[in-house]
Image (tube, rainbow, N blue to C red):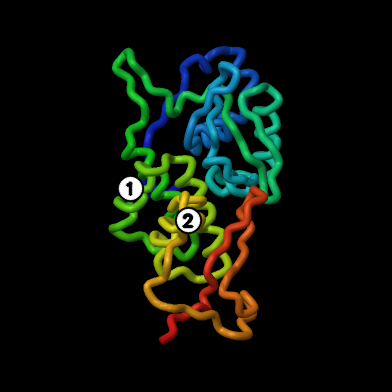
């Protein structure tokens, strides 16, 4: 991280400051803090709060190593240490691992001691930063307003998932307006409306795919596998153009 990049604060319990935790965490402290910082939501399971890291997006050792400036093998060793001692849990995904942080308090609202949960502005700033990390995205003045509105409508988990889908789409094709594409990803699909049909957005003009397109085969549709899931996202091929 450079000195010009925006920083923020997050909650960490001072209950970690004990000899026992010191011995268990040891050199894995920085990986632990990295995971806490990337937690986008908390969920309680059997009385334990688990923090979902990057909304369940698969993470590699290289991702963490690039931020911490250390070797990926060191990252892997320290992540195993954290999991062995119960500070985190993980599950394998096609392109990395999905992590949860045990006893997460990053998004825990406080009603005493003058402490408060991270502000909505802080959460939106984190989502905007994640959006701007996508290769091909050009930061703009609309970013905070548009992503803030999506956060208000859908919450941090869905917006994080939408940003991951946008990243997957932009990896294989150029997208002129990534924010509009993100909105389309998050827009609810209305099915079984009660009138015997499915409501779908209509184009204002007729559009047609280019015959012989090597990407879509002339269908106008592309199937994108969403990283870390079995979900497939159907998107419009760039070859589709308006026709008279």
Q: Nearer the viewer, residue 73 or 180?
A: 180
- Crowd class of label 1 (few under 14; some 14 to 19; many from 20; radius 10 Å): some
**Mark on residue 185?**
2
Q: Secondary structure at mark 1?
A: helix
Q: Earlier in the sequence, mark 2 or mark 1?
A: 1
Q: Is residue 100 left or right of residue 135?
A: right
Residue bearing the label numbered 1 = 149
Q: Does residue 13 sit above or below 214 in this rendering? A: above
Residue 142, percent across and down?
30, 57
Which residue is pictured at 50% across the width and 78% down the height?
240
Q: Is residue 180 above or below residue 115?
A: below
Please report the residue visible at 47 percent of the width from the left and 78 percent of the height from the top. Answer: 207
Q: Is residue 206 above or below residue 36?
A: below
Number of the label disc, if any, that sits on residue 122: none
Camera-nearest residue between 222 and 55: 222
Element type at marker 2? helix
Q: Residue at x 56, y 31 (%)?
A: 32
Which quadrant of the figure contains the C terminus? Answer: bottom left
Above or below residue 150? Residue 122 is above
- Residue at the spot 48% in from the left edge and 40% down from the top edge: 157
Check disc 2: other Cα within 10 Å, few if <14, some if 14-19, many if 20+: many
Find residue 98 and report its horizontal and vertical position in percent: 63, 40
- Could you tell me residue 172's position as x and y percent? 58, 68
């Amino acid at each position: 991280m450079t000195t010009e990049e925006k920083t923020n604060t997050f909650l960490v319990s001072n209950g970690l400051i004990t000899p026992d935790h010191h011995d268990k965490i040891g050199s894995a402290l920085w990986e632990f803090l990295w995971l806490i910082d990337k937690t986008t939501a908390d969920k309680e399971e059997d009385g334990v709060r688990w923090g979902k890291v990057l909304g369940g997006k698969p993470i590699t050792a290289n991702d963490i190593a690039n931020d911490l400036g250390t070797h990926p093998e060191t990252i892997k060793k320290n992540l195993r240490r954290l999991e062995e001692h119960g500070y985190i849990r993980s599950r394998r995904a096609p392109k990395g691992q999905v992590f949860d942080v045990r006893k997460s308090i990053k998004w825990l609202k406080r009603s005493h001691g003058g402490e408060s949960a991270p502000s909505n502005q802080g959460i939106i700033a984190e989502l905007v930063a994640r959006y701007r990390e996508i290769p091909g995205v050009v930061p703009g003045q609309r970013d905070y307003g548009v992503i803030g509105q999506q956060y208000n409508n859908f919450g941090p988990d869905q917006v994080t998932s939408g940003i991951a889908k946008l990243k997957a789409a932009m990896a294989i094709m150029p997208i002129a307006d990534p924010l509009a594409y993100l909105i389309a990803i998050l827009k609810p699909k209305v099915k079984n409306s009660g009138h015997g049909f499915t409501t779908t957005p209509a184009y204002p003009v007729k559009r047609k795919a280019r015959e012989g397109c090597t990407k879509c085969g002339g269908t106008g549709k592309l199937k994108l596998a969403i990283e870390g899931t079995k979900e497939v996202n159907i998107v419009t091929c760039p070859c589709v153009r308006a026709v008279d």
